[in-house]
């Protein structure tokens, strides 16, 4: 009997101890990790001035290694337009951050100009983000610029600029791979946030950059250190640091199958929306933990009685439950073209909208939507995946849409659930309205005459630089325009069409081919092939051929900005060879040039063979409505040019034309 009582006592004692241990392991104790995912340090790559090499080299090298960075952009510059697709599309789906760095990086003379330079840069960044994302961003006014006294209080403080640099250690070393890597390692050792700032990067870097092998060695190290080091954007890490400084966790309810927590912080709930990493003790029997906070859900693994998950301060209570893993994707959403009921016809050539009923996922909810736009069902010919947050609609004009009249477009939505599984749904498509009169002028020369042209300077100079209709010059049809240039003759044959149109948004297309015997001296100036003029007969924009040593024959556009300066597209830079667009002899090329008045804040865009090569915005003056078109050899450099140039299929329209 004593043995039985002794055994019962021992069993009871074991049960009590077991219960106590279970209770201690499941008491809801929660810690807030110093860094995201409980890593040992934080690190930011910052790049300034939206450089040419950022598009060609930096962003691709980050994406290849699964890294992100913060790019401080100048949206009104030609170098931003050079990489417009990178900034306004690729950056979104790669998690790369764009930060306002003023529109032109030129400073300001007064408060009005300062408000434009700063405010418009913020608005540009905001328009590229989901509507539900905070408007708080790191900001820098740009080095070497001058601003009016007191502009910070009068202008800058109107915009939510994150003063992040007080919380980070900035790199002060040399362009040396060992020093760069040591600085990153020190962030882990010191459990700190380190930032490296550079400008140009790549084989042909611009100013204030790191030599390419040093830069890529740093990226290789960062890729290898991602398990220990949080490589994040300046905005994300700044929000995390600020929220965490005053964050508090409160255990509200604790049951065997449920815990309820509160997470608060003194940070402004409207501006600080980045999730903190929490680690909570839960019952050891839990294998997975379902976490809910408002409309956010996720399922996380439980390890050794602890679950690590994410939650945003001041966004409602956090509920933790035991759960199994979600293995099914969300139920497809029905996508409607337009802002309301599904539309089949759109009258806008510069904007696309869609909406859908919220996707359903009973197990882990919806964590994010993405959208893409194409000319084929499910395609991405216009835009590849763009982050839309948790919004179930969008209206976008990013990348300065130039939609084709008569073309059908399709919108695809990807819904992602709380464990990363996704499903896709595509709209039934909509067509851009084909308006009569959208083509103001067209010329294919097939009638054999130049009767449509108001001005004809076809035989110029004693040795006769000549323009004439020729069956050798046909791109399509039976005839085209042939321009014959004699060696050493600088006289300029051209034809002109006046009183074109009152379109404020004008697209000019033409095809040209340099003959196999075409010759042009190196570094001897530019040959102008096309020119657009305004009501007063003044230059607005044009297309040119150059022959630069090291770059060879190349084509580019020029447009007049609001300071009277002629800006080149794609923003040619003499010490950056990749900025030149090569052009081959004896091969037809299609040129599209768009000019936009837009109440004094317009711009220009330039395409070669259907691919946009450059654009510039917010730089045209009022009254630059196009009235005249000139085609031929409008300007010939002093060094002289010889050979043949062929032109055909000229169109002037209010919208982009299909091929």
Image: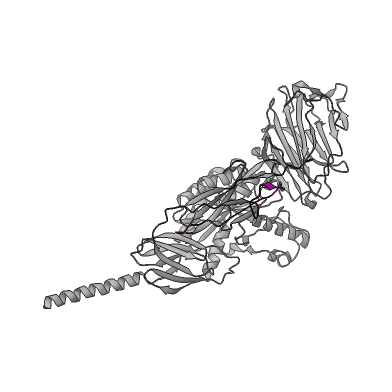
Q: Is residue 544 shown above or below 344?
A: above
Q: In the rendered view, does 507 fall on the left or right side of 362? A: right
Q: Does any portion of residue 40 appear in the rendered image? A: no
Question: How many numbered badges does the structure rendering display?
Answer: 0
- Determine the main secondary structure of the stretch shown in magenta: loop
Where does the C terminus fall, quadrant-wise?
Answer: top right
Q: Where is residue 256 in the image (x, y as percent from the top left)?
A: 36, 70
Where does the N terminus fall, quadrant-wise?
Answer: bottom left
Figure quadrant of residue 403: top right
**Of residues 368 and 136, which is closer to you in this image?**
368
Q: In the rendered view, does 104 fall on the left or right side of 67? A: right
Q: Does any portion of residue 621 appear in the rendered image? A: yes
Figure quadrant of residue 340: bottom right
Q: Which colour scheme is used?
A: one colour
Q: Position of residue 206 (x, y in %)?
A: 64, 45
Q: Is residue 73 shown above or below 498?
A: below
Q: Is residue 34 shown above or below 494?
A: below
**Of residues 182 and 69, which is closer to you in this image?**
69
Residue 624: in magenta span: no
Q: Position of residue 573 (x, y in %)?
A: 69, 41
* Residue at 13 percent of width and 75 percent of height: 4
Q: Which residue lies furthest to the left in this view?
A: 1
Q: Is residue 587 shown above or below 327?
A: above
The magenta region covers 337-363
Residue 346: in magenta span: yes
Q: Position of residue 217 (x, y in %)?
A: 50, 46
**Of residues 606 and 394, which is closer to you in this image?**
394
Figure quadrant of residue 356: bottom right
């Amino acid at each position: 009997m004593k043995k039985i009582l002794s055994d019962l006592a021992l069993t009871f004692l074991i049960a009590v101890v077991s219960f106590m241990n279970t209770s201690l392991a499941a008491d809801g104790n929660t810690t807030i990790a110093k860094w995201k995912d409980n890593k040992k340090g934080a690190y930011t790559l910052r790049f300034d001035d939206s450089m040419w090499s950022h598009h060609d080299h930096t962003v691709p090298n980050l994406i290849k290694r699964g890294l992100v960075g913060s790019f401080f952009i100048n949206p009104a510059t030609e170098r931003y337009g050079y990489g417009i697709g990178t900034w306004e599309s690729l950056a979104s789906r790669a998690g790369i951050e764009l930060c306002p760095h003023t529109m032109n990086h030129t400073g300001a003379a007064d408060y009005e100009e300062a408000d434009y330079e700063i405010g418009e840069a913020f608005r540009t960044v905001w328009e590229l983000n989901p509507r539900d994302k905070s408007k708080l961003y790191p900001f820098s006014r740009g080095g070497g610029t001058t601003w009016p006294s007191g502009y910070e209080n009068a202008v800058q403080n109107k915009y939510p600029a994150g003063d992040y640099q007080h919380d980070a250690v900035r790199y002060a070393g040399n362009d040396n791979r060992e020093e760069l890597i040591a600085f990153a390692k020190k962030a882990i050792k010191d459990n700190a946030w380190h930032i490296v700032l550079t400008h140009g990067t790549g084989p042909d870097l611009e100013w204030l950059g790191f030599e390419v092998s040093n830069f890529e060695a740093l990226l290789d190290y960062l890729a290898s250190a991602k398990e220990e080091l949080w490589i994040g954007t300046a905005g994300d890490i700044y929000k995390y640091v600020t929220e965490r400084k005053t964050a508090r966790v409160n255990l509200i309810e604790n049951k065997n199958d449920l815990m309820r927590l509160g997470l608060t912080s003194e940070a402004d709930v409207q501006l600080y929306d980045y999730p903190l990493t929490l680690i909570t003790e839960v019952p050891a029997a839990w294998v997975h933990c379902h976490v809910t906070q408002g409309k956010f859900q996720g399922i996380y693994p439980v390890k050794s009685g602890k679950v690590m998950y994410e939650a945003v301060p001041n966004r409602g209570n956090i509920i933790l439950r035991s759960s199994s893993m979600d293995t099914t994707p969300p139920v497809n959403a029905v996508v409607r073209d337009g802002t309301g009921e599904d539309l089949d016809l759109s009258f806008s050539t510069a904007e696309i909208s869609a909406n859908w009923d919220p996707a359903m996922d009973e197990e882990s909810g919806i964590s994010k939507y993405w959208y893409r736009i194409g000319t084929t069902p499910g395609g991405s010919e216009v835009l590849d995946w763009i982050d839309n947050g948790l919004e179930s609609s969008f209206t976008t004009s990013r990348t300065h849409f130039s939609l084709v009249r008569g073309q059908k477009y399709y919108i695809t939505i990807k819904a992602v659930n709380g464990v990363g599984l996704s499903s896709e749904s595509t709209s039934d498509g909509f067509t851009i309205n084909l308006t009569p009169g959208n083509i103001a002028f067209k010329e294919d020369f097939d009638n054999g005459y130049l009767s449509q042209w108001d001005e004809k300077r076809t035989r110029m100079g004693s040795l006769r630089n000549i323009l004439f209709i020729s069956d050798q010059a046909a791109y399509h049809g039976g005839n085209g325009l042939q321009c014959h240039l004699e060696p050493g003759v600088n006289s300029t044959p051209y034809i002109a069409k006046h009183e074109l149109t009152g379109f404020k948004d004008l697209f000019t297309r033409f095809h040209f081919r340099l003959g196999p015997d075409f010759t042009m001296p190196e570094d001897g100036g530019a040959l102008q092939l096309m020119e657009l003029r305004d009501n007063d007969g003044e230059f607005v924009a044009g297309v040119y051929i150059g022959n630069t040593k090291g770059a060879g024959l190349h084509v580019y556009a020029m447009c007049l900005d609001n300071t009277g300066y002629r800006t080149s597209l794609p923003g040619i830079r003499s010490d950056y060879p990749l900025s030149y667009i090569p052009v081959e002899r004896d091969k037809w090329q299609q040129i599209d040039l768009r000019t936009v008045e837009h109440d004094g804040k317009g711009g220009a865009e330039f395409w070669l063979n259907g691919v946009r090569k450059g654009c510039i915005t917010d730089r045209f003056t009022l009254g630059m409505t196009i009235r005249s078109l000139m085609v031929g050899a409008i300007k010939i450099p002093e060094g002289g040019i010889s050979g043949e140039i062929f032109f055909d299929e000229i169109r002037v329209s209010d919208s982009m034309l299909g091929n």
